[in-house]
Image (tube, helix red, strand yellow):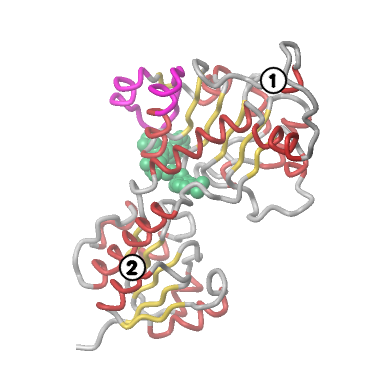
Amino acid sequence: MSKAKVYISKAIPKPAADYLEERFDCRTWDGQGAASRERLLEELAEVEGLLTASSVINQELLDRAPKLRAVSTVSVGYNHFDVQAMKERGVIGTHTPYVLDDTVADLVLGMMLSVSRRLPELDQFVKQGRWQRGVGLKEEHFFGFDVHHRTIGIIGMGRIGEAIAQRAVHGFGMKLLYTSRSAKPEVEQRFGGERRELDALLAQSDYVVLMTPLTAETKHMLREEHFRRMKPTAFFINASRGQTIEESALVKALQNGWIAGAALDVFDPEPPSPDNPLLAMTNVVTLPHIGSATAATRDDMVMLAARNLAAALLGEKPPNVVPELAHLV
Ligand code: NAP
């Protein structure tokens, strides 16, 4: 029996490439970055399985891929899947939860420390030779805000939210507030966390961490009225997706001093335009969407994505089908 055809839209590490090549007839994009949309659509005519990182899987793509049976994304977020269109076509979609939780949570704590203790700003201060004498007791110039023993409010208490809570509460002695669609009795027990309505969480937290998936419900979930509810001494951290907030409202909040600062791993659009006002603010830490970007974790994610794809194409139950398409396996 001939092997199923698989297209890999971005170069992947050798172990995962070998794993897929042993089982399938694979073609891999060998240019810079990921295959362009045009190229991707051209490649899909005979393909049964697609391994991708962020390609939008919509009706247009499905129409160009009549044999497609499974799409495996190397990410936990799958907002680039049109799950309704995939459901109608019976195309299985998989993602990579769990393996990145600790890595993303580490980064979020790093973002909190960076913005509150002004690490990027003061790094530049030293490197540019502007550090002329020692730090005195009144040199507010260098002062930041504490992270330890303050209040963290996590919006979206899921897998990654829990890993953040673990670090914040058990490492930094923070008080934990959270919002989720459902109550999390285990989180409340393990971390002494308290569930709040969104408005109360915003008003009571020193660090507001947004960690929901991007869905129709969470798109632009934080707008001007929400940033206005935060404390003027509070920091906003976004490691979810750029579109979960109205970015212009965040800009306004920072320009008007409604909040103290922000640390952002995600933007709308990505990369941000060079004239995005956030890029010129010293109290905003900006990162290029690196939540899961360590070598070890990315290797794990790619291997998990390869296993998910293989299982789906070989008629086995993939370990991580996205919930909306779970009935297809
Ligand atoms: P998860 O386990 O599914 O957790 C998501 C949480 O968000 C759940 O607790 C869910 O509540 C909550 N939620 C969903 N809709 C909500 C709403 N409308 N209001 C309030 N809470 C809501 O997902 P995860 O693995 O933690 O990942 C979360 C997201 O992080 C991903 O989808 C991705 O977009 C993002 N992410 C970003 C990076 C990066 O590089 N920056 C890396 C990894 C992940 P219930 O439990 O009550 O349903």
Q: Is residue 37 left or right of residue 21?
A: right
Circle 2 residues within 10 Å: few <14, some 14–19, many ≥20: some
Q: Which residue is mark 2?
A: 16
In which quadrant of the rendered image does the N terminus lie? bottom left
Q: Name the element at disc 2.
A: helix
Q: Is mark 1 within 8 Å of ligand 1?
A: no
Q: Which residue is mark 1?
A: 143
Q: Is residue 227 left or right of residue 185?
A: right
Residue in the foreground of this view, choosing between 93 and 271:
271
For the record, the magenta segment spans 167-192
For badge 2, the amino acid type reads Ala
Give residue 130's quadrant in the image: top right
Report the residue at 28% width, 71% height from top. 19
Between disc 2 and disc 1, the foreground one is 1
Residue 221 coordinates in the image, percent (x, y): 56, 38
Residue in the foreground of this view, choosing between 54 and 217:
54
Q: Is residue 220 left or right of residue 151?
A: right
Magenta region includes residue 262: no
Q: Name the element at disc 1.
A: loop
- Does the rendering let one see residue 77? yes
